[in-house]
Amino acid sequence: MTDTKERVLDAAEKLFAEQGYAATSLRSIVAAAGVNLAAIHYHFRSKEALLEAVIMRRAAPTNRERLRLLEKCQKEAGSKPPALDKILEAFLAPTFRAVQDSVHAVQFMRLVARIHAEGDLLPQLLQSHFSEMLSNYTEACLRTLPHLTVEEFFWRVHFATGAVTQALRPPQRLAAITGHDTEISEAVLQRLINFLCAGFNAPMKNIKSRRAKCSVAS
């Protein structure tokens, strides 16, 4: 990768994480990277393509490791479905360990949280680059959680995403409440896995659709 391209990616990652995608202009990225606007158009063509490159620079190695770890836990389980905690660990551990090892990973997680909040670009990025990994994990989870419908499973994934994002944020607020210094660690990862296992394993009960409630009320 050229030095110019790397500088643009570094600057874009930092500014997208701090300001959000929509609020960050190409001119501000150019100024931070110390390059001209033509360099961005030459290497990335557009702001959206630049965001995609920023995300995949960090996410592609993580996704390969997730697939490797999922394959490993499936082989260890043999003909049985893998244990849910093992599936979750395979999915989450690469991210948590990257955050522990690199300040760049912490910044990247801030960017991911921003993209989740802005929302519009995320479905397209997931479909373009994460489909194989997400499909494999979905299939493994549904085998392990036969009591859940597909719809209910994805609702719980939606809730779990918020918990994961929160767990990867620097926990100053938690430290202020508990009086103990806290940091993203293996212990935090295990706490998160325990929490998510309880949520995914919870039985389906008292779930009524909004449409059903409206028809009764009318």
Image (spheres, rainbow, N blue to C red):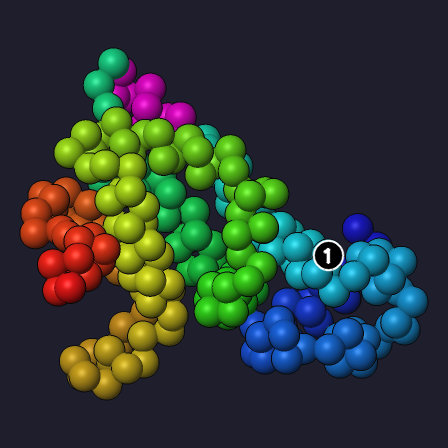
- Give residue 11's position: percent from left, percent from top: 70, 71
What residue is shown at x 22% (from left), y 19% (from top)? 80
Q: Position of residue 125 (x, y in %)?
A: 58, 50
In percent of width and height, residue 8 lies at 77, 66
155, 209: nearer the viewer: 209
Residue 184 seen from this side: no
In this orientation, which residue lies closer to the viewer: 152 or 162?
152
Which residue is more in the foreground, 48 or 173? 48
Tell me which amino acid carries mark 1: Ala
Mark 1 nearby-residue class (10 Å; few <14, some 14–19, many ≥20): some
* Above/below status of 105 relative to 70: below
Q: Residue at point 9% right, 43% down? A: 203
- Residue at position x 59%, y 80% from top? 19
Chief secondary structure of the magenta span?
helix
Q: Is 129 within the magenta?
A: no
What is the residue that sits farthest to the top in this orientation? 79
- What span is in magenta? 69-78
Residue that mark 1 sits on:
49
Which residue sits at x=28%, y=82%? 173
Residue 111: image x %, image y %?
54, 67
- In this view, the residue farthest toward the front is 218
